[in-house]
Amino acid sequence: MRLSLVMATKGRDRVIGEFLRSLDTQGDHEVELIVVDQNLDDRVSRVLKDYRGRAQIVHMGSIPGLSRARNVGLRAVSGDIVAFPDDDCVYPPNLLNRVVSFFLQSAEYGGLLVRGASPAGSDMARMARDSGPVTPRNVWLRAVSYGLFFRRAVVEKVGGFDESLGVGSGTDWGAGEDLDYPLRALAVGCRLYFDPSLIVWHPDPLEQGFRPATERAFRYGAGFGRVWRKHRFPWWQVCYYLLRPIGGGLLGLTTGDVARLGYYWASFRGRLRGWLA
């Protein structure tokens, strides 16, 4: 099976090389990497030139916006499986081997969702550890954009990403595209499966501390809240999601950790802002 990897990038170069090196550990699969470049300089070109003989690379340009860039890349895919690696993620050895095996053995599923974790070992806080089908009720615990793998037929059925969501969208909704896309796939009748034994390595912003991640917490929270409203999540589910950061904030309050308190307060405000919008 041929794989098409759509990578949007802005402001990075060295880490793209790390991702490309990780492709050498994925077995003998036909892979095309579609790099959608939002930089105004040639930093990405300089990295890609050393790998053009080792991987099929399509280098394209796009105006800013993560979802816009991915939509540009989607127009160029030719593979049987489509994925959306971030420009700072890395595929562990044999990940694509196992992804391909899943699709070959599970014809009833149109998509596979895998877990995100940092190379240092910390997991994304909201990601589940139990495998199984993805539903609107559990997608929050099972979806992260760089861990989405879809059959191309599903992508063609669902269409592009919502360009009002995600980093660089120009709206308050700085995330949520990774929830919105599988929810739309489910809405058109596609079956999705989550396997937490499969992992994509990605930096955890909280490893740098709560304070640097506070602004991001608001923007990401607003994006999540927006998706809950867009897909009409039930009130009790929204309440649960709103209460989660309150627990983290209370821990910061009781321990005197002002940075932790600020981070979780920003997350709560963002989620509420997105849901009320």
Image: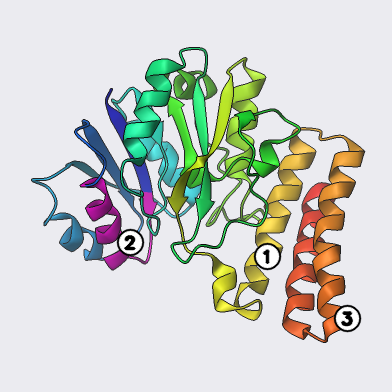
Residue flagged by tag 2: what amino acid is it? Asn
Q: For the residue labelled by badge 2, is the local secondary structure a helix, a strand or a loop?
A: loop
Question: Viewer-proximal residue, 1 or 38?
Answer: 1
Please report the bounds of the magenta region as a residue range: 8-24
Residue under numbered circle 3: 254
Query: For the N terminus, which image quadrant?
Result: top left
User: Viewed as shown, does residue 133 lie left or right of 94?
Assistant: right
Q: Earlier in the sequence, mark 1 or mark 2?
A: 2
- On residue 39, which mark appears? 2
* 1 or 2: mark nearer the eye: 1
Q: Residue at x 70, y 49 (%)?
A: 224
Q: Badges 1 and 2: C-beta atoms under 8 Å apart? A: no
Residue 11 is situated, as x and y percent measured from the top left of the image, at 37, 66
Q: CA distance from mark 3 to mark 1?
A: 21 Å
Is residue 11 in the magenta section?
yes
Q: Give residue 217's mark.
A: 1
Q: Residues within 10 Å of mark 2 (few under 14, many from 20)?
A: some
Q: Residues within 10 Å of mark 1 (few under 14, many from 20)?
A: many
Disc nearer the start of the sequence (3/1): 1
- Is 10 placed left or right of 28 in the picture? right
Secondary structure, mark 3, is helix
Q: Nearer the viewer, residue 25 or 257?
A: 25
